[in-house]
Amino acid sequence: MSSNNRPTDIGINRTGIALSPIDGPLMAEGASAAPPSSTGSARDAATVRLQYAVEAGDFGHMPPPLTLRGAANTAVELLKGTKANVLLDKLGERLAFERTGVRFYDGLIIKFEASGTWEGGPTLEELVAFRDDEARHFDLMVQTLTALGADPTAMTPSADLAAVEGLGVLQVISDPRTGLAQALHAQQIAELADVAGWDQLACLAETLGHTELTAQCRSALAQENLHAAAVARWLKAHAEIAARGELSAAS
Amino acid sequence: MSLDIFKERGTPLERQMFTWKEIAGEPYSKLDDDAFTRVRQILMHGVEQESCRFKHFAARFNPDLRLPLAQIRRVEHHQATMVNWLMPADQSALETTIGFEQVAIEVTAHVAAVEPDPYMAQVYRFGLLEDFDHLYRYAALMDRLCGKDANNILQSYTDIMPGRPTSVEHRSPEDDLRRYYEKTKAAPLTKIHAALITGAEWQTRDYYLTVGPTFADPLARQLYAEIASIEEQHVTQYEALSDPNETWLEKWLVQEATEAYAYWSCYCQEQHPRIKQIWERFLSYELEHLRIVRELMQTLERRDPAELLPAEFPDPLSFTSHRKFVRETLAEEVELRARGFDIVPPDQESPASVAYRAQLNGAGSPSAVVAAGYQWKPGTELTDPRTRRIEFASLAGEEAVR
């Protein structure tokens, strides 16, 4: 196992003030001796942010509907009204999330290959299988949106925000300096969000009377629950081994 | 529609003012607004940055011009900021990069298509095919690293396919220099084109150098470093097109005319009402900047600037898809290379450039690796079942075999 899976070993971390016994107190004394340049508090900034929040427009909307030619009659009926756009937005969100999820697992597999695993950690086969699950879920969303007469290539507002939310996860997984456990810690955020996302989508589909879609979402939810549980289990095992000081022999 | 730059009156300089609130105004919508609104925003930030950059260098060599340079530059700095702040925060650095390449392709294609000087037009077509390839490489990175589709940004205006391979774009410096127009013979539009594209490319170089290290992915970091190097070459190429015998005031005049022409082009075609107002406001600012420089030229050089400027601007920059022009150029000129000032067939390529890039690509080519086997598909390559269900093969095993 490479050393980058042992970040809790002692190194030279210079970020804390305690490492500067002379300059640190001078910093604190100087700052407390200089009064603020103006009166007020953090609430002043909150007021500015509130003003922007009140004035700001939307960051985007749903695309206009495509022709419903080719969509099943039942789908056409179910897609009438604004409720349909709520569903299509969330379907677009899951599509984008699962597609990016495939790439997250591509990154995790590289981590595995670079640094190996630990006792109670993931196997390569598990990571590959989870990647396949994400790819199938992505395809399910493409097929569903297409059947509903929607454009599966459109980035819906919720898909856009989900991508912004996922940027930090991508940064951790794609950084060559992080190990598999650190990358899985980021992936845990994605898996927990994915579980919540499928749960919400299943409920929404049920509310709107999409029986088959509801069942498909529940099936995906079950798989994502397995993913989230597995990631949590792997991370717990890693922390326990690290705490016992056995990490270097773990692989 | 035409614009008489000698008759139109601009906003007096003392009334060209800003507040922080309006500088940090509401951005455009990445999802809802037309891709060419983003193209215009990126282009105009590049033009303003070039304007500020030029004025800083001019101030170092011209003590008598320092005050007017500083006064106009301050306004242009705030114009640049306000234009750049139109970018929305949900637009990632990689998405913005796709926008930058769309600017480079569509604006350069327009310039190449209408440039009156055949040599200059060839140079623009040459550079165009390189930026066209960058788009393909970045789109592959976005697809394979992030699982996202570059066409969400491009909105189907611009093709995603290989151009002149980035890996062969690396040239020795002497092969990036080009002949310059002669200031007494060149059409005003030729001068404006050179200033416009130089500014756009310099901005692209700077942007890639700034955001490249913010990526964690090592291949992304390599790719930004590689393409930033080509953008540096492009700045070398395009700035070489301007006559070095122009006086500082002549160059300043061209710069202000370029800004006025570009804002006017944006104003003519913008669909977003609030952003159209910004283009109109800044066009008015630029007309005044241009008037001030004309006066300075009359006072300091005792010359009539009307000799150097068109009475009316030609047709505006065309903010549209140039798919047909780009594909024709691609089919006919993708194999061309450079030797000294000339664009040449591949068998006449400069040995210096061949050696230069052999060394630079010696430890691998990021642009080749990032797009290995890549074909863009609507909705990313993962819409293809063959890509989605790829059989897993151990990389460690492959590495061991090597």
Image (spheres, rainbow, N blue to C red):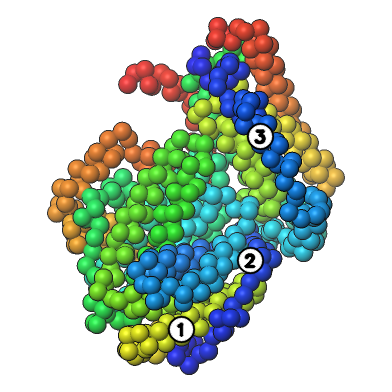
Give above or below for B73 relative to B385. Answer: below
Q: Is residue B56 left or right of residue B348?
A: right
**Residue A181: x, y in percent?**
61, 21
Q: Residues within 10 Å of mark 2 (few under 14, many from 20)?
A: some
Give above or below for A106 relative to B171. Answer: above
- Cα distance between the residues tagged 3 and 2: 38 Å
Residue at 70% in and 41% down: A31
The image's mark for residue B323 is none
Q: Amino acid at mark 1?
A: Ile
The image's mark for residue B23 is 2
Q: Residues within 10 Å of mark 3 (few under 14, many from 20)?
A: few
**Residue B73: x, y in percent?**
49, 70
Is residue B333 visible to us here?
Answer: yes
Q: Which of the two discs, 3 and 1, sits closer to the camera?
A: 3
The image's mark for residue B292 is 1
Q: Which residue is mark 3?
A: A26
